[in-house]
Amino acid sequence: MKFSLSDEDRDLVEMIDRVAMEQFRPKAYDDRDSHRRPIENMRVLGELGVLGICLPEEVGGAGKSAISGILAIERIAHACPRTGAAAVMAIAGPGMFIARWGNEDQKARYLPPILRGEEAWSISLSEPGAGTALTDLTTRAAIDGDVCRINGAKTFCSNAGVNDHILLFCRFGPGTGGIGAVILDRDTPGLTISKPHHHMGGNIWHELFFDNATIPRENVLFEGNAFRKLMGSYSLERTAAGAWAIGVAQAAFEMACDYANERKQFGRPIAEFQLVQGRIADMCLRLEQARWLVYKACVDADGTASRLESSMAKVAATEAAVYVTDQAMQMFGATGMSQEMPLEWMYRMVRPYTVAGGTSDIHRVMIASEVLQRRFDQRVPAK
């Protein structure tokens, strides 16, 4: 694997790191369980051109490689976990789908506010009966003249009640080929958004209910045949989630290292105890191994993340982040468990990412499938 950045890209990442540490870190751990979107920080990133870092120049992006975007997300998350999570959705989320697959009107209408950091999007995939088994989704869309009507229900849609738009995956016809996608506004007629529910890290999610919800036909992104495109584009999002997790874990690791040198017990710094040294070494190993899998996923032959590499990166990074934040809390003892410290919140932030974006379990199945070149059908065989 060859991994190098141009001088221009290196300067860009260093600038992002500097701005994030100077402007985002001072307030990064305030209002930890608030679901308030970091609007001011996102506008700063928009002004710097960071939110379009991986998008083509012809749609207003910077035209940089995937690795530049991944490094940017890691450094932002290292300074501020909440801003990092928002940056993942802006850099590798719905904007990427629209830039790749949208028509010219959709690109002109929706991309500029994303790139300026002014608007935020949700993605709606999961349903009560279709989580990991995503192809079982039943929410239906039907073209009716100049409009599209949607019926069904969705769940676990993060921030749907506060974000500006929702990229909704739904069924236009039977089978995998019938899966498509549409763009929704929060106030779409016929759409009911539930009260907010809370994940363990303080983030909110909503249920969505569609009763002949009606959108203009021009808001249809894919009229079927979207599933393979979804999975292909989602590889970068998975890798971006891994970069976010590494950034948060790096901050926790640094806190633990500083504490090991400063905290004294039995008359000397706890860093002098062998078990603490072993814990630091294991945290460092997990972090670095995962970091390089994330980087590798972005520097293959065509500069995109393959299914195998993105799954390995996502599993390794999110599980390493859970381990590192947990071990950092252990080193701090009772102080680490206190809500006056950010570590317990950082743990609660990273833990859901072993489920979101595909569970670690299903990604392990996908990894085995790619390595063995065999398809493992999880369904009960038809009689």
Image (cartoon, rainbow, N blue to C red):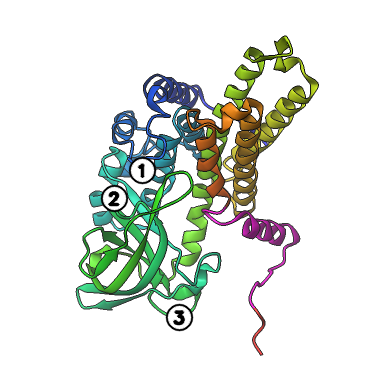
Q: Amino acid type of disc 2?
A: Val
Please tell me in which quadrant of the rendered image residue 119 appears: top left
**Dividing the image into 4 quarters, which one contains the N terminus?**
top right
User: Horizontal and vertical percent for residue 229?
Assistant: 47, 61
Sequence order check: which comes first, mark 2 or mark 3?
Answer: 2
User: Is residue 357 inside the magenta stretch?
Assistant: yes
**Dividing the image into 4 quarters, which one contains the C terminus?**
bottom right
User: Is residue 115 inside the magenta stretch?
Assistant: no
Q: Between 143 and 281, which is closer to the camera in this rendering? A: 281
- Farthest residue, direction right: 274
Q: Are marks 1 and 2 in contact (CB under 8 Å)?
A: yes
Q: Amino acid type of disc 1?
A: His
Q: Amino acid type of disc 3?
A: Pro
Question: Height in image: 249 above or below 21?
Answer: below
Question: Height in image: 21 above or below 186?
Answer: above
Name the residue beneath numbered marker 2: 162
- C-alpha gap between disc 3 and disc 1: 37 Å
- C-alpha gap between disc 1 and disc 2: 9 Å
Q: Is residue 216 left or right of residue 72?
A: left
Sequence order check: which comes first, mark 3 or mark 1?
Answer: 1
* Residue occupying image coordinates x 61% and y 51%: 311
Name the residue beneath numbered marker 1: 35
Disc assigned to residue 174: 3
